[in-house]
Amino acid sequence: MANVALFGNPNVGKSVLFGCLTGSYVTVSNYPGTTVEVSRGSLRAGGNLYEVIDTPGLYSIYPITEEERVALRILTEGRPDVIVQVMDAKNIERMLPLTFQLMESGVPLVLVLNMIDEADQNGISIDVERLTELLGVRVATTVAINGQGIDRLIGLIRSAMHESASRGKKPMELPPYSDSRMHVWHERARVIARQVCRKSGARHGMSRLDRVLMSPLTGMPILAAVVYFGLYLFVGVLGAGVVVDLLEGAYTDYLNPFIENVVSATVPWPALRGLFAGEYGIFTLGVRYAVAIIMPIVAFYFFVFALLEDSGYLPRLGFLLDRAFKRIGLSGRAIIPMVLGLGCVSMATMVTRTLPTRRERIIATFLLALCIPCAAQTGVIMGLLAVRPHVLAAWAFIIISIFMAVGMLGAKIIPGARPTFLLEVPPMRMPQMRNVFVKTGARVAWYFKEVVPLFALASALIWLGQVTGAFDLLVRAMSAPLSLMGLPDSAATAFIFGFFRRDYGAAGLYDLNRQGVFDANQLLVAAVVLTLFLPCITQFIITLKERGWKIGVALSLFILMFSFVTGVALNGLLVIAHIKL
Amino acid sequence: MNVSEEAEEILEILWIAYEETNSAHLRLSQLRTMPELPVLRELIDAGVLTHAHGDDFVTLTEHGMHEARDAIRRHRLSERLLTDILSVKKDLIHETACQFEHHLHRGVDTNICTLLGHPQVCPHGKPIPPGRCCEEGREMVARAIAPLASLKPGEHGEVVYLHTTDPRRAQMLVTMGVAPGTEITLLSGYPSYLFQIGEGQFAVDRQVAMEIHVRLER
């Protein structure tokens, strides 16, 4: 099938355009580096079927970050039949050098001036005919978020396809990087931009909103407010508290008895009944955890996160926090994977691709795996500790201290240069509610696909363990390390769940706590240890894929040891200091 | 110290040899230009060199080291001035600088250095030895070129050159559009640096903001 690949600078709307052309949704946001993977879809135009490829943003054909490399590979190895370069219509001069570079490939090119409405609003008018003439390529103007100009673009893609077919594929040789060549491209861009762009009205520097968001005096209180209202009140109190209580209550009171009845009526062997219903049954425990505890919390978090993403707040946060992040060997750019990690650590580990150096990627992966609890876990812990605010505060204090201490240590130990902070800051935009809901839905669905099979598997294994007696053996084996941490034997189940996923372990904790097996001290120790615990199998696999098996295995072993030692030390401290929370 | 122009050229060559070998003990036959005898005599008389008769080696005295360093500083500052401010063509820079540098005595070099924003390298990437003015960050004459980090929010100008310690970072900046010749405006300088190029805004840290050199427009 003939294919067309979308290329362009970060945050110009490639993924939105991909959605317009193919009708399939990929995550879109308002910050550079949302797309880190290649997506493929199909476009039907005039009786032909074309494959459309969406790529991560790239500034030039000389890649710096991993995701740029991913994009370039589509050009050099994938050899598309047609290139569509998407450009921000407001920034033609800055983005034209990439056009010249892509033209070096010899592949027919269609240029898209996207966000032409924003250019209009900023008083920039563009002479498209003149631009077409000067560049010798097809030029379309679009507003991808509302589908404007797409039909004409599809027409241009078709005509470029004809040209491509008649030309045939030639070997592709991209010129190596040189300052002088870059200089020529920039000069040419300047000359062309001067001829086709008309600007009326003065340039506006920082908007009033940016002045408030990006000055520490006002920006830090705003950050605190975002955390308090968005994370604590909305996700913690409303999502993890009210909604989970409601769903959990309904599930245990109404659904579980019903499941028990159905299972005992249809499954004749009592031993097998335990697989589906009962204490660790797939439906009575596995699915209950997923649907009634994890889902509402994750959905609430991803909703808040989508709002933050689409507004353009995150790069501004990077601007504010770069200095603090430098202390832990990262730059302000790392704010995006870190905040995403508060949602799902696995997704965030993939996004560490956007960090420019290997050192930053290792530190970020490590901190994500060790100290950043995912939404489900944070939510459960908040729900668990909300009735004892001082324990919640102690938990937060301990985790943040470990985050900083381990980060600073990592920055010292791991060799490499100080990170560079360089991040494009897009304008603040009003989030489109439709996109916020679609994106939240897509992420929750993704999360679910990851979680439910594992929950089922865990339930099945535990059932098998119970039938064979291995489970009791395991629980007994864990009683020694647990007692070192001052925890009761019954906590073993939560930790066994934790090996599958740490949010699953937190859900187990939630369940145990309802049965009143913990005092406040034990609750704190258990919450801290499970937060530091190995995240989940998905995260482990992604770490292996992104960082290699050596780092993946070393990280996991370290985390396992570290979480246990921290638990023992914390318990020891509480006992020695006679602290009763 | 007042020496002839020829002697000053030799001083520069001696400094370059010192930079390469990191030793004050230099082999005459390996210098880029062999000094003529009268010039050598002049330098020895001025207390710059010691030279045993018939030997291939000369040794820079402490005083000589100082003089050589100043000579190269004047030469490279001249190159910077000719490139950044006077837009002299690249292939003429070295030659013109050789004539220009002799006029940079008695504090003129300090003023030029300040005017150029205390540059650290010449256009060829060779280090310019810092003068007292660089350490003090003096600004007695108005600056014409300054690192982006020293601009006040709202000030703007044209990017003249990037001086990065890491070539990858220069490449990163250039591909993002921060290339020589581009209009740039500083929007904010705290807690990080925010600048605008065209309609695009970028956030960078202090290190990067120190590496972008801007010709100020008033």
Image (tube, rainbow, N blue to C red):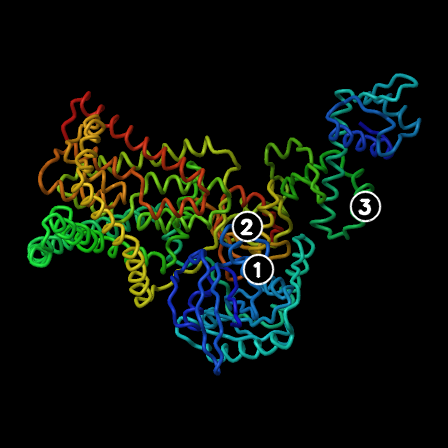
Between B73 and A86, the one lying in front of the other is A86
Task: Give the side of residue A406 with respect to residue B127, left or right.
Answer: left
**Mark 3 chain:** B
Tell which residue pokes out farthest to the front in this image. A269
When asked about the image quadrant of residue A399, the answer is: top left
Q: Residue at x 72, y 45 (%)?
A: B81
Could you classify mark 3 by the number of other residues whose Cα lies within 10 Å: few (under 14), some (14-19), or many (20 or more)? some
- Tell me the element at label 1: loop
- Which image quarter is the C terminus of chain B in? bottom right
Q: Residues within 10 Å of mark 2 (few under 14, many from 20)?
A: many
Dot 1 amino acid type:
Glu
Q: Position of residue A10 (x, y in %)?
A: 48, 59
Front residue of A326 and A43: A43
> In which quadrant of the rendered image does the N terminus of chain B lie?
top right
Q: Please, which chain is the residue tagged with disc 2 on?
A: A
**Position of A448 compared to A213: left or right?**
left
Are the residues flagged by discs 3 and 2 in contact, CB closer than 8 Å?
A: no
